Image (cartoon, rainbow, N blue to C red):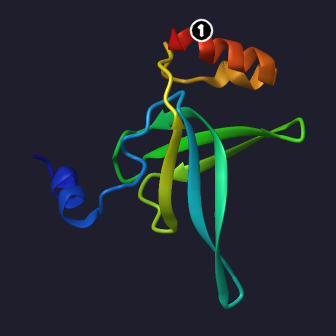
Amino acid sequence: MNKLQIFQAKHMPEGKLKDLQVGWTVKVFQKIKEGDKTRTQAFEGTVIAKKHGIEAGGTITVRKVSNGIGVEKVFPIHLPSIEKVQVLKNPRVRRAKLYYLRDKTSREIKRKVKQSQD
């Protein structure tokens, strides 16, 4: 093991997002601090990218369509403000990155996901 792997094993907590796969529909619950109060915000969408595995800088990109506008949010895997992650659907997809979903309508996305489940 090199020095980076030793450091990560010793100091990095287990990420809550490490088991997620691209194509899954997830709901990520994140603690938001507003002034002296904290609340939990849920972000539900499709995982379109997973970068750098479970390293210190690893991230996942979650995309949803809200009121006809596409919204993407990048979550670091080891972010301490993430409370939990619910997996809603876990279809099998044939791509490592689903960036092509940015150009598709929601109807076309559902059709693609349904075909990959069969």
In the displayed structure, 40 sits above or below 65; it is: below
- Which residue was labeled with disc 1? 115
- State the image quarter where residue 46 is shown: top right
Q: How many marks?
A: 1
Image coordinates for residue 12, horizontal then vertical, percent: 29, 62
Q: Is residue 93 left or right of residue 44?
A: left
Image coordinates for residue 53, horizontal then vertical, percent: 37, 39
Furthest-right residue in view? 67
Closer-to-camera residue (9/92): 92
Picture residue at 70% right of the left edge, 22% below the top? 101
Q: Secondary structure at mark 1?
A: helix
Q: Is residue 17 left or right of residue 44?
A: left
Q: Is residue 110 left or right of residue 3?
A: right
Furthest-left residue in view? 1
Picture residue at 82% right of the left edge, 21% below the top? 105
How crowded is the residue under tag 1: few (<14 C-alpha within 10 Å), some, or many (20+)?
few
In the displayed structure, 45 sits above or below 107; it is: below
Q: Amino acid at mark 1?
A: Gln
Image coordinates for residue 116, horizontal then vertical, percent: 54, 11
Closer-to-camera residue (62/109): 109
- State the image quarter where residue 39 is shown: bottom right
In the displayed structure, 41 sits above or below 56; it is: below
Image coordinates for residue 15, horizontal then vertical, percent: 36, 55
In the displayed structure, 73 sits above or below 110; it is: below
